[in-house]
Image (cartoon, coloured by chain):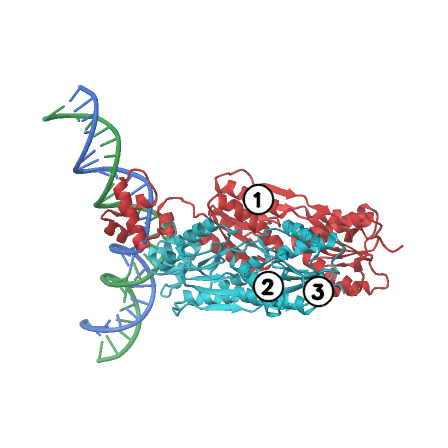
Chain colours: A cyan, B red, C blue, D green
Amino acid sequence: MRDVAALAGVSLKTVSRVVNEEAGVSPDVRERVGAAVRRLDYRPNLAASNLRRTGARTGLIGALVQDLSNSFSAGVLRSLEDIARAHRTAVLAASLDEGVDREQAMVHDLVTRRVDGLVLMPASQRQDYLVAELRTGTPAVFVDRPPRGVDADSVVVDNLLGARLATEHLLDHGHRRIAALFHLPQIPTAHERIAGFTSAHTDRGVRPDDRLVVEGITSTDEATEVVHRLLDLDDPPTAIFAGRNILASGAVRALAERGLRRSVALVSFDDFPMADLLDPGLTVVRQDVSRIGRTVAQMLFERIGGESSPPRHVVIEPTLVVRGSGEIPPPA
Amino acid sequence: MRDVAALAGVSLKTVSRVVNEEAGVSPDVRERVGAAVRRLDYRPNLAASNLRRTGARTGLIGALVQDLSNSFSAGVLRSLEDIARAHRTAVLAASLDEGVDREQAMVHDLVTRRVDGLVLMPASQRQDYLVAELRTGTPAVFVDRPPRGVDADSVVVDNLLGARLATEHLLDHGHRRIAALFHLPQIPTAHERIAGFTSAHTDRGVRPDDRLVVEGITSTDEATEVVHRLLDLDDPPTAIFAGRNILASGAVRALAERGLRRSVALVSFDDFPMADLLDPGLTVVRQDVSRIGRTVAQMLFERIGGESSPPRHVVIEPTLVVRGSGEIPPPA
DNA sequence: CTGCCTCGTGACAACGTTGTCAGGAACCAT
DNA sequence: ATGGTTCCTGACAACGTTGTCACGAGGCAG
């Protein structure tokens, strides 16, 4: 900036005025400074600028999601980004991979970077540590998983309802022995889905077989193995509820390996591209990813704009998408 | 920081020493300052710190990809992030959506933010504008699409080879009327894939039918329509090459609607989750997404580390993954 | 011609840090 | 006791900006 000022023969302040398009600079000075800027490839230092401007925003928000490459996280991030763009804000994105320490470290780093806001798909069980971070004035919005130990806005899916929709659908088609595959039960979403599966049974007066409910499955391959094991039982399940899309693909693979894709019913939580192209098409519980992302973004930018009402907790209802795999009847 | 110093009864500099874990502070002072930091929720201002430290890195890189929610972009970003993490660097990610203006604006913004480096999956035809930006010392690595009008590192896939592999595979299975669906031909990857499709034919002495080659298809639905139109020809194709995964799903849908999934061969560029679960499994040309991301990250951090050798251009070879859809023979 | 106002410009301080250097206290060897 | 170390600490300037204020030139009304 000093060089630009020298080259244009003006003061630092005048360069600042031109760069920030402030009024009150004569046309020829503006032109001279502009030429100097171009000649020297001058780029204002945003950090210094933000430092000086009292209480200015950094135009940066942090988004901590489970895994950037998973279609749910990526979809939420994408619609978040679209809204952020409209607010001239860039997005710092990171994957947590269910890492509790990483979550804390990243939040700390982002607060230190003075992000204007935080979007968090937490890996941790409780976020008490956030209380201190949020006292610094950085607003946070939780997504997919609700806050514990700290009061903050959240946007979550009604996982209990979603799991009920899926389970009732299978019960309605006559199934009484329904297997269920779930992620780690300490993850709130998995926990609620388990509860939904159970309560749908209870409401219908059906007692689920504990041996058919498997929790703590974290990979597609593991899901395949589990399904094979369940199908080997003396009294195998006639239907399967997959509590997560990656578990559904494991289940489909196991069924395919046994030629049972048209014999055993399957409903999955989470839609994914091409699910309708499977044969039979995969019946799923769909979460409106783009709506989730947009809602999160709106809430966050309201907070950034100074909104200080008590935290809001938005629950988004999932819907059942019928495609064939969930409508297979049990054997006569 | 002033408040912390006052509360602990020390100077600013001593607080700075404690916060940065510098040696030479007596244990009791260190403890007093630590307590004050905790009591006041003090967070150092990274921007101010970077401003003062001459030539310090911001620990920030920018990644401009085509679309965060597309599995290719997301996969590259994810492995990039993993390497960045090891370098204690955060990733600013944004989607360009083939927007040329947006690309320039984002690059400018990122340079202004003083990112340590830039990863670019360009939307523009030429990146002459980058020359000025790079003069500021910010290194850039291109990914998926090569630089034009500026000399910079790049990591691209051998699209010509990939398209040849797919086309030759179909020719080898006896197909002579192969339809092909491509994205906008001005996009370098699409352009090369078209060339690979053509050259494979030429090498085998087969003349492709121009009416079967459709360029400029940008959505799944459009691909479905195009395939229907092609199948309505008097002399319809016996095989289809989809130049991109979203075009493949349109093609699968069209074939499904006509009950031709087991009659017309199909090979796609780009693998995607569950492609093996389709019936028949989708034969694809696979790009090693994670290797691409890792290579890009390594090159970028070498540059950030001061490497100043001439730009390197890495070409990654795709492979054919055989799953069934590509091995369907033409009608006798 | 005087006084006042407007306009364009620059000097200066401040944003929150840290590098440099200097100074005082405590210790050791002479 | 003297001089020299070593250890701990603080004063000050500087990083690249911008908000505040002041100043001079020119224009206009009285």
Q: Is residue B278 left or right of residue B66?
A: right
**Do marks 1 and 2 share a chain?**
no
Please tell me whether residue A83 is drawn above or below residue B61 in the rendered image: below
Q: Amino acid at mark 2?
A: Phe
Q: Secondary structure at mark 1?
A: helix
Q: Is residue A282 left or right of B179 when viewed as pictured?
A: left
| Residue highlighted by disc 3 | B222
The chain letter for the residue carrying disc 1 is: B
Where, by quadrant of the figure, is residue A140 drawn? Answer: bottom left
> x%, y% of residue B185?
69, 56
| Disc 3: host chain | B
Displayed quadrant of residue B312: top right
Residue C13 lies, in percent from the top left, at 25, 55
Name which residue type carries label 1: Arg
Residue A321 x %, y %: 65, 67
Of residues A183 and A152, the one drawn nearer to the viewer in this rendering: A183
Separation of marks 2 and 3 at Cα, in angstroms = 39 Å
Q: Nearer the viewer, residue C17 or A261?
A: A261
With respect to residue A204, does B201 lie above or below?
A: above
The Cα atoms of the two marked residues, 3 and 1, are separated by 34 Å
Is A153 or A189 nearer to us in this picture? A189
Host chain of mark 2 = A
Element marked by disc 3: helix
Residue B272 in view (yes/no): no
Q: Report the residue marked by disc 2.
A: A197
Q: Which residue is mark 1?
A: B294
The residue nearer to you, when weighing B127 against C23, is C23
Position above or below: D26 against A229 = below
**Where does the image place residue A52, in percent across and percent down from the top left?**
34, 57
Q: Quadrant of the C terminus of chain A?
A: bottom right
Label 2: which secondary element = helix
